[in-house]
Amino acid sequence: MKIIPIAIFLMAASVYAGAPEGKASFASKCQGCHGANGEGKASIAKMFSVTMHPLGSKEIQTKPDADLKKTITEGHGKMKPVGGLDDKQVADVIAFVRTLKE
């Protein structure tokens, strides 16, 4: 019976693999606009006249990883692409974003 809890732990750990590294990249590249916990900064949203959904919201969390990667690497709307991140760092940022739940 101990196999099931271990398997669940391993599955959960693999889902968010890279999240600690992603937190560091997020802090340096994303936090300025999205806030430390992905809540979004009202002043940035107001300045750009946009609605900024919290990254832990259903609107963001239900997006596939491929959509999040595209947003990070190509930008979206008034958000410019995030430069200076390789593919692994982008994947790590996505893993971190997946830990942000409302």
Image (spheres, rainbow, N blue to C red):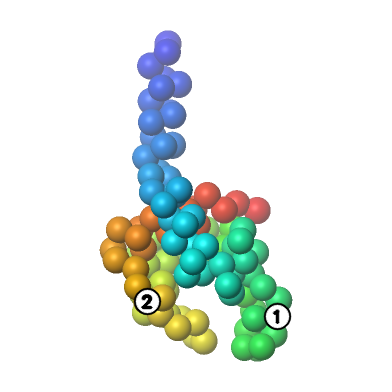
Residue 57 appears anywhere in the view: no
Q: Residues within 10 Å of mark 2 (few under 14, many from 20)?
A: few
Q: Mark 2 = which residue?
A: 83
The image position of residue 80, as x and y in percent, is 45, 83
- Secondary structure type for disc 2: loop
Residue at 34% across, 68% down: 85
Residue 101 appears anywhere in the view: yes
In the displayed structure, does residue 12 sit left or right of residue 101? left
Q: Amino acid at mark 2?
A: Gly
Q: Residues within 10 Å of mark 1 (few under 14, many from 20)?
A: few
Q: Name the foreground residue: 17 vs 85.
A: 85
- Secondary structure type for disc 1: helix
**Which quarter shows the N terminus?**
top left
In the picture as drawn, the residue positioned furthest to the left comes out as 87
Residue 31, quarter of picture: bottom right
Q: Name the foreground residue: 17 vs 15.
A: 17
Q: Earlier in the sequence, mark 1 or mark 2?
A: 1
Q: Mark 1 = which residue?
A: 43
Residue at 41% across, 72% down: 72
The image position of residue 35, as x and y in percent, is 62, 66
Query: Which of the labelled discs sits on residue 27, or is there none?
Result: none
